[in-house]
Image (cartoon, rainbow, N blue to C red):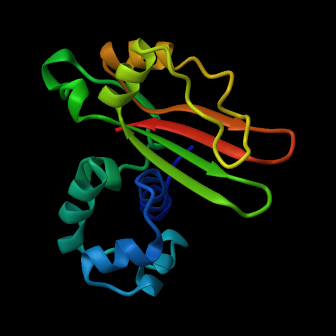
Amino acid sequence: MEQSIGKKIAYYRKAKGMTQDSLAESLGLTPQAISKWENDQTCPDITLLSPLAKLFGTTVDELLSHKPVQEVRLVPEAERKSIDDLFLRIIIDSHEGDKVRVNLPIALIKLSIEMGMKLPEINGNNSLKDIDFTQIIAFVEKGVMGKLVEIESKDGDMVYILVE
């Protein structure tokens, strides 16, 4: 299924935990401009494609391609960042409207696991309790990046775990 540049911008913005307001501010634009892009009413100016790609950690080719965003990817060993430079992003959108964003350095999670600590319950949400963070770290060490976990609870809570 083909994907528009607007849908890709929305995907990458959300994956970075940014609002339309914060993306607009970082580009010197209005939130309405971002909204029009994401709703496929207009497209970004060509001079903004490179800054957008850099901000999102992707390429201009990926933004312009009609191929869907590759949510999980295997980074070749020569192109991998040090695990100390990577972050685990946990995004929780509850059915009650709560939005929780947690950004943790992978090195901190790895150290916590080695010390026998478990990730605590976040905002009363038990969706993380069955996630094997040791396995996630093992995937990251092998070069797996992107959206690794997506959970929708029976209550309608959405939980995403991404590695960037």
Q: Is residue 139 above or below residue 50?
A: above
**Residue 151 falls left or right of residue 105:** right
Residue in the picture at 27% in, 47% down: 58
Q: Nearer the viewer, residue 21 or 67?
A: 21
Residue 75 at what x, y percent from top left? Answer: 28, 23
Q: Quadrant of the N terminus?
A: top right
Q: Locate residue 137 relative to residue 129 in the image: left or right.
A: left
Please name the residue shown 32% across and 13% down the image.
Answer: 142
Q: Nearer the viewer, residue 161 or 7?
A: 161
Q: Quadrant location of the C terminus?
A: top left
Which residue reaches farthest left?
A: 78
x, y (%) of residue 41? 51, 79
Vertical side of 51 occupied by 1: above or below: above
Instruction: Please count the marks in the image.
Output: 0
Q: At 50% from the left edge and 78% from the top edge, which residue is drawn?
A: 35
Identify whether 157 is placed above or below 33.
above
Question: Left or right: 43 with respect to 53?
Answer: right
**Residue 71 seen in the figure:** yes
Q: Please state which of residues 122 and 145 is positioned toward the viewer in this rendering.
A: 122
Q: Tell me where residue 69 appears, x and y as whole percent.
A: 45, 43
Q: Which of the 4 image quadrants contains residue 9?
A: bottom left
> Residue at (46%, 73%) from the top-left corner?
20
Q: Is residue 114 left or right of residue 143?
A: right
Q: Quadrant of residue 149?
A: top right
**Residue 43 visible in the displayed image:** no
**Along the viewing direction, whichever of 83 and 68 lies nearer the viewer:** 83
**In the rendered view, would you say 84 is above or below 46?**
above
How far across and down, in percent of the image, does residue 2 sit? 52, 48
